[in-house]
């Protein structure tokens, strides 16, 4: 059904909001299972649905009248492939943030052609299969080191420790900083500043007031851009084999990257590379604890079965839950009339549970093959450049964990409320006696 849309005197769309709540902080403070009940009802609508703006935003926008929720698998894939209709440049988050923060943090995922085309060509060389194979040995060495340290932490802490702090966040921190070329003395602070960038809903990291949160976010971006700019300057004079060197010397059709562009990509890779792997690892261990038969199946042939298991863990975790687009012109989507300027939000956590495309989507099935999950995007120009890096890391870490600690158990995860990343802040772990 096509919905006719007019604008009121204030400029707001004259259309009714769906009665199901996906805009409140209360909704995003519940568990994924609870949210899925609402998403399931929205998918049954058979179309995209119109909702009020996200509540209690850091930056109020009087022209923000709401968003279209894309909860069905096929509709999400369509949006990703229609990049001329649905733009990334205005921002990729449900929430409104200052333009300076958007520019400093989103890099290529917040760009549209032709700028996106140029930037992606410049950075894509760092993520070729050949480059991934080159760093695979380093990833495996870091996985061994991290599990070594986890064993020590379990012994030090009386048999139970925080899996996030002692394992899940450490492997991607070392790998991303190895790839980028960040020195040992600076990588811990770099990782901490990026944690601020993904935890603006958590007073523990950023404070209570909007002023505190925005100030802390700007502080984190300033540090990260300063570090990237300093490293890029050094690598222009003395290049090495790290990614900063590649970015500092990258050239396509006579064009090179500015310090600001290198800084924004550094922020993007540090956030995306750290948090997506961290969340997949944490949710994955919890899933193996909740489904012991699946763990037993995997342990029966770890090497052969791990690739399919990694795909299912990434689907199950769906570490990035939403991405926003903005309508670049009047158009139609799933029978609805979309107006230029409308926010359109893709809900990956819903699409990865869509019964029309994922068989038995609410069951963990590590043998699922093929696995058409869209945790790395639904295709199109913004498909995740680092998808192979994430797969390499997850395969290396789970192989090491399940070989050396096959009985490792996970407690109830402590989640950070939010609508973007599926963040586990803490989760205890122990060896089953």
Image (cartoon, helix red, strand yellow):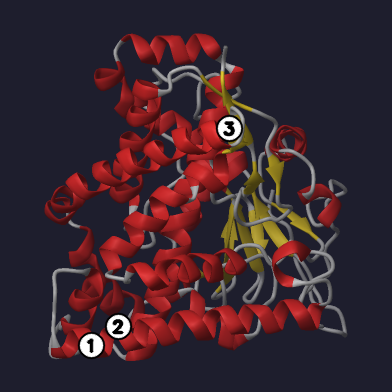
Q: Which residue is mark 3?
A: 354
Query: Compared with residue 345, is residue 71 higher up or lower down, i.e. above or below?
Result: above
Quick one: SS at disc 1? helix
| Dot 2 and dot 1 residues touching (CB under 8 Å) | yes
How crowded is the residue under tag 3: few (<14 C-alpha within 10 Å), some, or many (20+)?
many
Q: Which residue is mark 1?
A: 234
Quick one: SS at disc 2? helix
Which one is nearer the viewer's eye here, 47 or 122?
Answer: 122
Return the x and y of residue 374 as percentages of the image width and height. Answer: 45, 43
Q: Residue 128 falls in which quadrant of the image?
A: bottom left
Q: Residue at x 59, y 69 (%)?
A: 197
How crowded is the residue under tag 1: few (<14 C-alpha within 10 Å), some, or many (20+)?
some
Q: Which residue is mark 2?
A: 231
How crowded is the residue under tag 2: few (<14 C-alpha within 10 Å), some, or many (20+)?
some
Instruction: Answer with left or right where residue 97 lies relative to residue 15.
Output: left
Q: Nearer the viewer, mark 3 or mark 1?
A: 1
Instruction: Answer with left or right where residue 120 lies relative to residue 280.
Output: left
Rounded to the nearest angstrom, the CA distance separating label 2 from label 1 is 5 Å
Return the x and y of residue 66 as percentages of the image width and height. Answer: 77, 66
Mark nearer the N terminus (3 vs 1): 1
Query: Compared with residue 7, is residue 395 higher up or lower down, i.e. above or below?
Result: above
Return the x and y of residue 336 as percentages of the image width and height. Answer: 66, 56
Instruction: Answer with left or right where residue 354 lies relative to residue 342.
Output: left
Q: Residue 117 falls in which quadrant of the image?
A: bottom left
Return the x and y of residue 254 as percentages of the image width and height. Answer: 13, 90
Rounded to the nearest angstrom, the CA distance separating label 3 from label 2 is 44 Å
Which one is nearer the viewer's eye here, 9 or 388?
Answer: 388
Q: Residue at x 54, y 51 (%)?
A: 320
Disc marking residue 89: none
Rounded to the nearest angstrom, the CA distance separating label 3 from label 1 is 48 Å
Q: Nearer the viewer, mark 3 or mark 2?
A: 2
């Amino acid at each position: 059904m096509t919905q006719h849309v007019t604008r009121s005197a204030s400029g707001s769309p004259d259309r009714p909001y769906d009665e199901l709540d996906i805009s409140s902080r209360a909704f995003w403070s519940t568990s994924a299972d609870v949210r899925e009940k609402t998403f399931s009802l929205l998918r049954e609508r058979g179309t995209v649905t119109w909702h009020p703006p996200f509540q209690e935003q850091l930056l109020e926008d009087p022209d923000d009248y709401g968003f279209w929720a894309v909860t069905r698998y096929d509709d999400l894939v369509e949006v990703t492939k229609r990049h001329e209709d649905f733009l990334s440049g205005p921002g990729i988050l449900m929430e409104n943030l200052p333009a300076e923060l958007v520019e400093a943090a989103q890099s290529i995922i917040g760009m549209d052609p032709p700028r996106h085309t140029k930037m992606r060509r410049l950075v894509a060389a760092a993520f070729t299969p050949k480059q991934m194979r080159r760093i695979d040995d380093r990833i495996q060495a870091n996985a061994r080191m991290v599990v070594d340290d986890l064993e020590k932490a379990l012994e030090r802490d009386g048999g139970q420790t925080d899996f996030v702090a002692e394992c899940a966040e450490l492997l991607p921190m070392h790998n991303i900083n190895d790839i980028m070329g960040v020195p040992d003395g600076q990588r811990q602070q770099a990782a901490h500043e990026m944690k601020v960038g993904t935890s603006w809903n958590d007073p523990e990291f950023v404070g209570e007031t909007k002023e505190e949160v925005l100030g802390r976010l700007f502080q984190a971006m300033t540090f990260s851009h300063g570090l990237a700019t300093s490293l890029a300057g050094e690598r222009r004079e003395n290049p090495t084999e790290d990614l900063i060197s590649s970015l500092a010397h990258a050239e396509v059709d006579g064009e090179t990257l500015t310090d600001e562009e290198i800084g924004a990509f550094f922020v993007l890779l540090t956030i995306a590379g750290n948090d997506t792997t961290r969340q997949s690892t944490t949710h994955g261990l919890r899933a193996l604890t909740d489904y012991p038969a699946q763990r037993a199946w995997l342990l029966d042939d770890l090497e052969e079965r791990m690739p399919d298991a990694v795909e299912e863990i990434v689907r199950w975790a769906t570490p990035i839950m939403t991405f926003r687009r903005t309508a670049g012109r009047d158009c139609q989507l799933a029978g609805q009339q979309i107006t230029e300027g409308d926010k359109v939000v893709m809900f990956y956590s819903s699409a990865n549970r869509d019964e029309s495309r994922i068989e038995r989507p609410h069951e963990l099935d590590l043998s699922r093959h093929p696995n058409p999950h869209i945790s790395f995007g639904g295709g199109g120009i913004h498909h995740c450049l680092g998808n192979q890096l994430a797969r390499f890391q997850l395969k290396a870490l789970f192989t090491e964990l399940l070989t050396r600690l096959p009985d490792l158990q996970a407690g109830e995860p402590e989640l950070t409320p939010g609508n973007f990343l599926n963040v586990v802040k803490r989760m205890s772990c122990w060896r089953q006696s």
